[in-house]
């Protein structure tokens, strides 16, 4: 399970909204890296075992900067000429499939869910208590489902694309 924590002395909807913006920015960057991996001659010609995705965020009131990096290539092996690896198939004994594209897609989907859930939680925490009581039977009525288009239209401040 993926968790995103915001270190702050305040614990209110603003913190959750910042976490949502960070997760939204990470989601975009993970999908960009995923697309680059799909089109990479390096990825096409290597078996990648045990690499990592480094996520870095600097969120302050009113702005956030994020960056991701693909690191840890110690166990990466060049494929023999003529060998083929797709990276989107599960590993089986004797294969060189590493599933790196499967993992990237799952990471992006998990981060998108973090952005969505923290955004909803931020909205709930910012609503006046009387409104919360009035809509307690059906909070979905107050918030509705947040689509990916709505997620993309969230205010970004100085968030990195």
Image: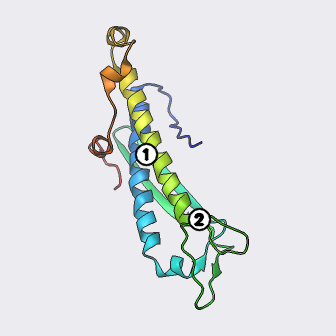
Describe residue 36's horizontal placement relative to residue 97 as left or right.
Answer: left
Numbered label attached to residue 112: 1
Select label 1 or label 2 by which is in front.
Answer: 2
Q: Position of residue 143 (x, y in %)?
A: 32, 26
Tell me the residue at 62%/84% (across/down).
Answer: 79
Pick whichever, 97 or 67, lies toward us: 97
The residue at 33%/18% (across/down) is 127
Residue 45 spot, x, y in % from top left: 55, 82
Query: Which image quarter: residue 78?
Result: bottom right
Q: CA distance from mark 1 to mark 2?
A: 20 Å
Helix, strand or loop for disc 1:
helix
Which of the marked residues, 1 or 2, is nearer the chain's N terminus?
2
Find residue 49 and report its horizontal and vertical position in percent: 66, 69
Which residue ends up furthest to the bottom in the rendered image? 81
Q: Which residue is mark 2?
A: 99
Q: Where is the N terminus found, in terms of image quarters? A: top right
Q: Is residue 104 left or right of residue 35?
A: right
Q: Nearer the viewer, residue 93 or 34?
A: 93
Which picture quadrant has residue 135? top left
């Amino acid at each position: 399970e993926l968790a995103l924590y915001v270190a702050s002395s305040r614990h209110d909807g603003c913190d959750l909204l910042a976490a949502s913006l960070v997760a939204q920015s990470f989601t975009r960057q993970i999908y960009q890296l995923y697309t680059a991996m799909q089109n990479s001659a390096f990825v096409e010609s290597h078996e990648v075992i045990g690499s990592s995705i480094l996520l870095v965020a600097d969120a302050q009131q009113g702005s956030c900067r994020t960056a991701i990096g693909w690191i840890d290539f110690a166990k990466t092996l060049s494929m023999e000429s003529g060998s083929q690896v797709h990276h989107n198939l599960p590993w089986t004994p004797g294969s060189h499939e590493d599933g790196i594209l499967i993992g990237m897609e799952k990471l992006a989907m998990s981060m998108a869910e973090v952005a969505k859930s923290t955004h909803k939680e931020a909205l709930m925490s910012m609503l006046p208590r009387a409104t919360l009581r009035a809509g307690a039977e059906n909070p979905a009525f107050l918030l509705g489902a947040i689509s990916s288009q709505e997620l993309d239209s969230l205010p970004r401040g100085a968030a990195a694309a």
